[in-house]
């Protein structure tokens, strides 16, 4: 039987993905739960299996602005991969959400020990980073363009 995390689309075709199974656990978040805050320690990431999570960014003078919504089948959290390992955004569950949670330090150790896995995982997370930063850019442009009219 294939562990559920290996069936997640983010890991599909990832070489040696089975090496990550011992670094994961099931996680559940009630609607309204805060998963992490911008600037906090990025010590984990999640593969969403159900639910939705809002990513937000603190905008001076405006408070938190939602920049993107992450849903089932997507990955949440990339800040764990790059020093200084602090969150670049904040996140709140919009509805009851279930996920597979990974311990970042343990996954980094696996990646260090298996460069092929580390490279492939880093490539996937770089794609996530690019998408999230573009979403933040678009959302901030939208916020500031509306205030000028």
Image (cartoon, helix red, strand yellow):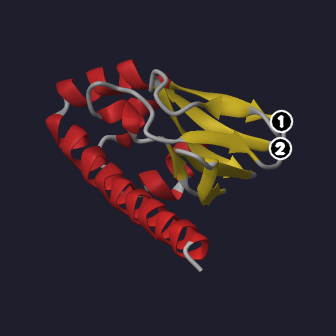
Q: Residues within 10 Å of mark 1 (few under 14, many from 20)?
A: some
Rendered location of residue 109, percent (x, y): 28, 20
> Relative to 139, does residue 80 appear above or below in the rendering?
above
**Residue drawn at (25%, 31%), measured in percent from left and top?**
111
Residue 25 is situated, as x and y percent measured from the top left of the image, at: 60, 26
Residue placed most toward the observer, 141 or 148: 148
- Residue 2 in view in this figure: no
Number of marks in the image? Answer: 2
The secondary structure type at the circle numbered 1 is: loop
Q: Residue at x 29, y 24 (%)?
A: 84
| Towards the viewer: 144 or 113 | 144
Mark 1 or 2, nearer chain start: 1
Q: Is residue 70 visible?
A: yes
User: Which residue is the site of mark 1?
Assistant: 30
**Residue identifier under label 2:** 96
- Name the spot of residue 10 as percent of width and height, x first: 46, 55
Q: Residue at x 34, y 50 (%)?
A: 125
Classify the position of the C terminus by image quarter.
bottom right
């Amino acid at each position: 039987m294939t562990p559920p995390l290996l069936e997640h689309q983010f890991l599909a075709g990832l070489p040696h993905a089975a090496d990550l199974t011992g670094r994961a656990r099931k996680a559940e978040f009630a609607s309204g739960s805060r998963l992490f805050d911008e600037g906090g320690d990025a010590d984990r990431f999640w593969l969403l299996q159900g639910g939705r999570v809002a990513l937000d960014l603190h905008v001076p003078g405006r408070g938190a602005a939602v920049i993107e919504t992450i849903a089932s089948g997507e990955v949440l959290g990339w800040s764990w991969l790059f020093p200084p390992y602090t969150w670049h955004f904040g996140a709140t569950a919009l509805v009851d959400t279930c996920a597979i949670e990974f311990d970042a330090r343990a996954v980094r150790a696996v990646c260090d020990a298996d460069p092929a896995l580390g490279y492939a995982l880093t490539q996937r997370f770089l794609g996530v980073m690019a998408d999230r930063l573009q979403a933040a850019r678009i959302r901030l442009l939208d916020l500031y363009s509306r205030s000028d009219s």
